[in-house]
Structures are given as structure tokens and as C-alpha cells.
Image (cartoon, rainbow, N blue to C red):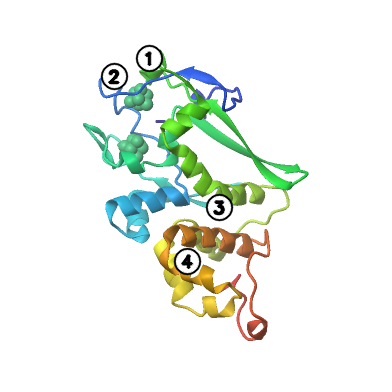
Amino acid sequence: MLLSTKFVEPIERTLDSTFKFRCHKNISCFNKCCRLTNILLTPYDILRMKKRLGISSGEFLEKFTYTHIDEKSSHPYAVLKMMDDEGKCPFVTPEGCSIYEDRPAICRYYPVGQGLMVKQSEKGIVNEGFYFFIKEPNCLGFQEDKEWTIETWRIDQGVDLYDEMNSEWKEIQLRRDNPGQPKLDEKKQSLMYMASYDIDKFRRFVSESKFLDILDIDKEEVEKIKTDEIAMMKFGFKYLKYILILEETLKVKEEYRKQTKDVRNP
Ligand code: SF4
Ligand code: SF4
């Protein structure tokens, strides 16, 4: 699954676009795509994989990822670390993907790639998705006879749920890509990385400090984020919008405004 732009078809596709593809154990290229590839991870990918492996987000990130800082936006991204001399994915086995049910969104989409654009509409800022095919010569799946639309492929691969979970986070990346957005300093980069990927650390940061006392948050929401990982992940997106000054998603209580450091720069 080498996500090099070299094999990306330069044609924008829609959900109705059709293609023929099948990937199965008896195909001679089986597993060949699970090496020497750049798999950029999303918050929901990490949540699923760390749960599957029964480890903390911090352990997962340390063992299986490296950090890539995007030159243009200065955003930190977690990328799956390929292992051993052959550069194999840590989860590939002779029988296939050992975390198949919890594999990342990029692996689910393949051989389809997904792009997003931010557009201004009557309803405000909206995300508009587009798709493209990745046609690597080593991937023989395109020679098979099963026909899909991109929509049926997304549903079959269970990536529709991943898109729903990650959409707010992706929108943050896109909005920050707009001209005029300042580059992040190291402190902001590390807060962004924590709120995006290291959910267990973010939970400690939120619940073991005065964070929740300082903010004017609904009691029900506080209870939810304490017990529900998805709610915590989504609270992380709210926090990101706030610290990146994209939206006033959080409100510091009146009585704390003069006494405490701003939540934006803890
Ligand atoms: S996570 Fe699974 S599907 Fe994705 S590259 Fe690794 S082994 Fe392949
Ligand atoms: S058909 Fe393509 S996706 Fe499937 S194993 Fe072969 S290279 Fe990988």
C-alpha cells in the first residue's frame, strides 16, 4: 500500500465512480502492499488499534508510530512505523492483517484515496470530499472481476464510520491550511498531538488538573467525557478548535478569567 503520488490517478472521482477490484488470500500479490508504505493515522484509528491491542495510546504511539511534521501547516501527524529490514507493517502476518477489523482508514480505503476541500457555502464552511484511484503496478486486484462504486466499497470496508468519526478533526486540518494561519510553536504542536492522538494522556490532562473546574461545561458532558472514549476524542477536537483560535468552542468561567492561565496556553 505505497501511498506515493506516483501511482495516484490524476482524475477526481465521486461516490458513483465505478471500478473492478478484489483482494483475497489466493492472489499472488497478497500482503505485498503492507510494506514500505506511509500510513498517516487519524484519532479514531489510534483509538481502535490501541483498544484492539489492549495498550494505552502512549504505548501504541511509542511502539508503532513516528511523528511527521507537515512543512506547510506545521501540524504533527502520527505515521505507522514500518518494521524490520523489509519495511513490513508491524501487523502483517502470512495470513494477512492481524488487526483486520480495526485496521486504519487508509488501509480500508485502498485502492481508493480520499481528499477533502473546505468550501464556503450558504450554510457556512463545509467539507467537500473527492476520491481518486491508486493504481500501483504490483497490485493485481484491479484485474479481478468484482465491480464496485466508491460508495459500495466504503460501506463494505467499514470506512464510512471512520470518516464520520474523523470528519471534525479533518476539518480542523483543512481550516488551518488556509492562508494567514500562523505556524504552531513546539508547545502548540505537542498539545495538538496529545489532543489528536494520545487520548489517555489527554484524559489525565483534563481530569487530573483544574481544567474542568475552570471551564464552563455542561455537567452531563463532563460525566460523558470521563467515561466514554469517543466523547473524550470529540472533546479533544473542541479543545483543538479553541487553542488554535478557530472557534470559541470553550468558555472559561467568569471567576477564573483573571486568576488562571488561559486554557489555550496551559
Ligand atoms: S494495518 Fe493491516 S492492512 Fe494496514 S498495512 Fe498493516 S497489515 Fe496491512
Ligand atoms: S490485491 Fe492489492 S490490496 Fe490486495 S493484497 Fe494485492 S496488492 Fe494488496
Q: Are marks 3 and 2 in contact (CB under 8 Å)?
A: no
- Rendered view: 3 above or below 40: above
Q: Are marks 4 and 2 in contact (CB under 8 Å)?
A: no
User: Label 4 amino acid?
Assistant: Ile
- Residue under numbered circle 2: 27
Most distant residue in the left direction: 94
Taking the image in four quarters, ligand 1 sits in the one at top left
Most foreground residue, 196 or 166: 166
Question: Could you tell me which secondary element the residue under label 4 belongs to?
Answer: helix
Classify residue 254 as left or right of residue 14. Answer: right
Task: Give percent across and percent down for residue 72.
Answer: 61, 47
Task: Give percent across and percent down for residue 260.
Answer: 60, 82
**Mark 4 surroundings: few (<14), some (14-19) or many (≥20) residues within 10 A:** some
Query: Which of the labelled discs sits on residue 75, or is there none?
Result: 3
- Rendered view: 229 above or below 92: below
Is residue 3 visible to the viewer in this orientation of the structure?
no
Query: Which of the labelled discs sits on residue 225, or is there none?
Result: 4
Q: Earlier in the sequence, mark 1 or mark 4?
A: 1
Q: Earlier in the sequence, mark 2 or mark 1?
A: 2
Classify residue 151 as left or right of residue 128. Answer: left
Question: Could you tell me which secondary element the residue under label 2 belongs to?
Answer: loop
